[in-house]
Amino acid sequence: MKNAKPSTVAEKAALAQASAPESTHEHLHGHAHDHEHDHGHLQAASPEAALVLAEEYCRERGEKLTPIRRKVLELLLTSGRATKAYSLLDDMRQIHPGSAPPTVYRALDFLLSAGLVHRIESINAFTVCHDLTQCQHGILVVCQQCGNVTELHQPKLRQALVAQIEDAGYRLASEEIELKGLCSACQAAEAGAAAKADASAKATTSGA
């Protein structure tokens, strides 16, 4: 995202973070970064602080984070992982029963165009952008099992990869580069399930 004013936005976020209830100060999971300081990091802030960041950012762009757009962004923030549009619609209908699909899709279109969210093509879902004020398209690592997304900010690595892709005669269809994988939590769950199944099999064999 470009043309934002980090100092102004960061100050707003700091005020919101300080005034938010203690229970909301937990960091959302799913995004990793290598910056030493948080300058407008949506995922590093509480949902309240992140929404302040987003509203200020939109205001500086001459745009408005309407109540519907704000609510969709809030749902993505509280989800903490990639979420499909129909799931967002279901959540919206619990708050506003009359919500229709175009309402959510229009909000998502705005959030995408503003650079506040990413679309994860491989699983057709949406996730909040990692960095509001210094956002450069990074490399997204997507867990194919739970939808967790880690956004890697490695400009040199990305540039080298894009150069290799272009040298091969291809042009990227999207600014996003996605890598599919299995997150550590899902790996641990798989290992636990495998160990349990193995123990069960051994117990059955020994009892036969």
Image (spheres, rainbow, N blue to C red):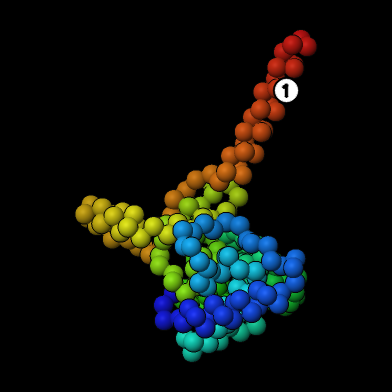
Residue 102 visible at all: no
Residue reaching furthest front?
Answer: 36
28 up-or-down from 107: above or below = above
- Rendered location of residue 3, percent (x, y): 41, 81
Name the amino acid, label 1.
Answer: Ser
Quick check: 187 above or below 81? Answer: above
> Going by the picture, which residue comes out furthest to the bottom?
62
Q: Residue at x 57, y 59 (%)?
A: 82
Is 107 displayed left or right of 195 in the figure?
left
| Image x and y of residue 157, in percent | 34, 54
Task: Give the camera-side residue of 58 and 97.
Answer: 58
Q: Can the viewer see residue 132? A: yes
For label 1, the SS is helix
Q: Which residue is mark 1?
A: 200
Looking at the image, which residue sits at the far right? 207
Of the pair 38 and 65, the residue shown nearer to us: 38
Residue depicted at 48% across the width and 62% down the height: 36
Q: On screen, 200 above or below 170?
A: above
Q: Residue at x 74, y 11 (%)?
A: 206
Q: Position of residue 66 (x, y in %)?
A: 61, 84
Q: Label 1: how many residues lie within 10 Å, few (<14), some (14-19) or many (20+)? A: few
Q: Quadrant of the C terminus?
A: top right
On the image, which quarter does residue 69 sit in? bottom right
Q: Residue at x 42, y 59 (%)?
A: 153
Quadrant containing the N terminus in the rendered view: bottom left
Whole-percent x, y for residue 55 in the image: 57, 82
Compare residues 121 and 195 and report the one nearer the observer.
195
